[in-house]
Image (cartoon, grey):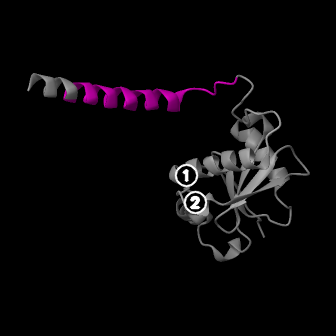
């Protein structure tokens, strides 16, 4: 009986330690000191250069995912619509369409756009965010997809660009 109780206590202790380790890891800064976190202002400036100027109505989220609205004049509240779409199409579920992506190299600014599930939804990735100095499309795409997942699970709008007709 005592042996069984000790085994159970040991297992519970391991589970508790495992949970605490995950919490610590999530709050750590990147292990590679060359990897940087972009400021909101830096993100906004790069995304402005990444978007085709013909699209004037878009919303940018904290981790670099943005949604372009090509018929924003028909939307009553663009913020509410952006949050709704981000919650629907942002989170990445294993085996679902949100896991698919396409990586596009930008011409007017540094970095890449990761496109995927959700019409008009893209995620900006800057080279300073990557651990590898010469990342391939798979690394960029997976990183961009993880950023979109963060935005989908905790959507926080940092910028809205509106065409004031």
Task: State left or right for residue 9 relative to residue 131.
Answer: left
- Residue 156 visible, this angle: no
Residue found 51% across the figure and 32% down from its top: 26
Residue drawn at 70 percent across, 59 percent down:
101
Mark 2 or mark 1: which comes first in sequence? 2
Q: Which residues are magenta?
A: 8-32
Q: Secondary structure at mark 2?
A: helix
Q: Relative to 86, say whether 138 is above or below.
A: above
x and y, in percent, of residue 127 in the image: 79, 38
Q: Which residue is mark 2?
A: 86
The residue wearing badge 1 is: 155
Q: Position of residue 62 (x, y in %)?
A: 63, 45
Residue at the right extreme of this rendering:
107
Q: Position of residue 43 (x, y in %)?
A: 74, 43
Q: Main secondary structure of the magenta part?
A: helix
Residue 137, horizontal then vertical, whole percent = 78, 49
Name the one closer to the observer, 160 or 114. Answer: 114
């Amino acid at each position: 009986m005592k042996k069984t109780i000790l085994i159970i206590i040991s297992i519970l202790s391991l589970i508790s330690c495992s949970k605490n380790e995950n919490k610590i890891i999530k709050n750590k800064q990147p292990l590679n000191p060359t990897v940087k976190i972009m400021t909101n202002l830096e993100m906004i400036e790069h995304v402005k250069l990444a978007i085709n100027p013909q699209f004037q109505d878009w919303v940018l989220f904290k981790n670099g995912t943005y949604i372009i609205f090509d018929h924003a004049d028909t939307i009553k509240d663009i913020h509410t619509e952006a949050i709704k779409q981000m919650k629907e199409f942002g989170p990445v579920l294993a085996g679902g369409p949100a896991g698919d992506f396409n990586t596009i190299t930008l011409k007017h600014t540094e970095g890449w756009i990761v496109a995927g599930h959700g019409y008009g939804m893209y995620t900006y990735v800057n080279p300073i965010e990557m651990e590898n100095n010469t990342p391939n499309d798979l690394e960029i795409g997976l990183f961009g997809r993880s950023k979109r997942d963060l935005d989908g699970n905790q959507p926080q709008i940092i910028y809205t660009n509106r065409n004031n007709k």
